[in-house]
């Protein structure tokens, strides 16, 4: 029976919630009049407040959810969409993410067969983050790290965070690039403020464009050549690049460049919210191959079961689906051997 690994899930630890409740401006956690919690986001791609319930922070609620959804294992990451990294100074980020990583390690240790964790790192202090990634592997039992895709919108930005990649190479880490900007000290970033008109469409355009730019930086330059043992994952099917890949490859051939499609297959992409669209998922499979696609649901922002059902009902044949689902297991097995 195929084991289902969900590579796109998020969690807020108790100490992270407490820290963010002390802030008086976004990004912050605040209490609603009914006593519930909500997150005020500081983001170039999301402007609405996000309600926070037990699915965001309670471990037993999480395990019950994946049992019901038919998920065998979750890989948990910090939700960079919230815009914390670009808003906090280095000292505050070190405190928040250091405590979060300790809390995440404790959660994973309670459910080792069901949960794995990716360390939260700050781009406000790259040297600290490199050391923290080393600690995450050596002491915390985590399998890699999550970073905002904004750090890789340009080659200058990617070079700025290279010390993190150097540590990742030593450990054979898994690096997850998720929605959002990096700290303003990282060069080469761009964003448009959230718009009131056609907000959802503009959010999708902004976030998917940023993922595509990061993918180009990573795959169509020599940046990753120094890090052959690092697996890199982009959220949301890698953005709009699957729709452009054929044109990129054709134009590259006219310019005398080597084939571009094999280079694009250097990274993994996850299904995320775009994977619920059978046309988008089918295009990604045709362009990239099922071998480079991971299942991811975006839990707890959305329930896992409908996303899993959408992927299974996307029209992909059984062999392609099995390949897609097996990718996650194979990466976890490689990471276990490297630990």
Image: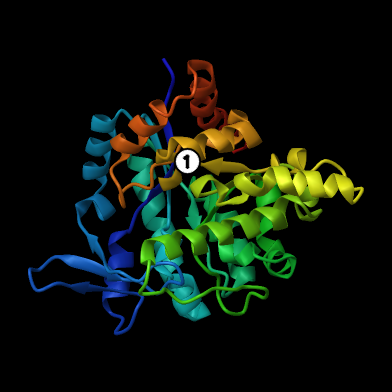
Indicate the quadrant containing the N terminus: top left, top right, bottom left or bottom right.
top left
Q: Residue at x 49, y 24 (%)?
A: 316
The image shows residue 243 at horizontal and vertical percentages of: 61, 46
Provide the residue designation for mark 1.
271
Q: Quadrant of residue 336?
A: top right
Q: From the viewer's perspective, tell me whether residue 1 is left or right of residue 70.
A: right
The count of marks equals: 1
Q: Is residue 254 left or right of residue 33?
A: right
Residue at figure coordinates x 34%, y 54% from the top left? 11
Q: Disc 1 on helix, strand or loop? A: loop
Task: Specify how the rendered protein is coloured.
Answer: rainbow
Q: Residue furthest right?
A: 256
**Which quarter shows the C terminus?**
top right
| Displayed quadrant of residue 163 | bottom right
In this view, 52 is above or below 69 = below
Taking depth in this image into account, of 294 and 328 the one nearest to the observer is 294
The location of residue 87, given as percent across then percent down, is: 46, 78
| Residue extending farthest left | 34
Q: Position of residue 167 (x, y in %)?
A: 67, 55
Q: Is residue 212 above or below residue 265?
A: below
Residue 132 visible: no
How crowded pointer 1 is (Cα within 10 Å; few <14, some 14-19, many 20+) is rated as many
Image quadrant of residue 185? bottom right
Residue in front for this viewpoint, 18 or 221: 221
Q: Is residue 289 above or below residue 42?
A: above
Query: Is residue 275 in view from this perspective?
Result: yes
Is residue 276 left or right of 257 when viewed as pictured? Answer: left
Q: Residue at x 82, y 41 (%)?
A: 259
The x, y position of residue 334, in whole percent, is 61, 32
């Amino acid at each position: 029976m195929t084991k289902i690994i969900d590579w796109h899930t998020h969690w807020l630890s108790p100490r992270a919630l407490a820290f963010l409740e002390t802030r008086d401006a976004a990004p912050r956690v605040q209490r609603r009049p009914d006593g519930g919690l909500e997150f005020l986001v500081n983001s170039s791609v999301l402007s609405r407040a996000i309600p926070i319930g037990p699915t965001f922070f309670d471990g037993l609620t999480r395990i019950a959810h994946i049992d019901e959804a038919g998920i065998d294992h979750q890989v948990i990451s910090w939700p960079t969409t919230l815009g914390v990294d670009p808003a906090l100074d280095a000292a505050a980020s070190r405190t928040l993410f250091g405590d979060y990583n300790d809390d995440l390690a404790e959660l994973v240790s309670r459910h080792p067969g069901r949960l794995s964790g990716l360390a939260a790192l700050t781009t406000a202090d790259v040297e600290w983050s490199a050391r923290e990634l080393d600690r995450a592997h050596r002491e915390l039992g985590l399998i890699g790290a999550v970073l905002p895709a904004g750090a890789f919108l340009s080659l200058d930005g990617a070079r700025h965070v290279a010390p993190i990649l150097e540590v990742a190479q030593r450990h054979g880490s898994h690096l997850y690039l998720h929605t959002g900007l990096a700290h303003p000290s990282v060069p080469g970033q761009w964003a448009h403020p959230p718009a009131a008109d056609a907000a959802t469409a503009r959010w999708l355009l902004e976030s998917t464009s940023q993922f595509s730019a990061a993918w180009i930086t990573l795959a169509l330059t020599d940046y990753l050549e120094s890090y052959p043992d690092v697996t890199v994952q982009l959220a949301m099917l890698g953005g709009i690049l699957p729709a452009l890949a054929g044109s990129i490859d054709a134009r590259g051939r006219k310019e005398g460049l080597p084939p571009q499609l094999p280079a694009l297959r250097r990274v993994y992409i996850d299904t995320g919210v775009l994977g619920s669209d059978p046309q988008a998922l089918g295009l990604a499979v045709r362009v990239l191959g099922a071998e480079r696609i991971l299942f991811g649901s975006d839990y707890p922002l959305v329930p896992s079961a409908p996303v899993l059902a959408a992927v299974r009902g996307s029209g992909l044949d059984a062999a392609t689906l099995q390949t897609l689902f097996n990718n996650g297991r194979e990466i976890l097995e490689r990471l276990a051997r490297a630990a």
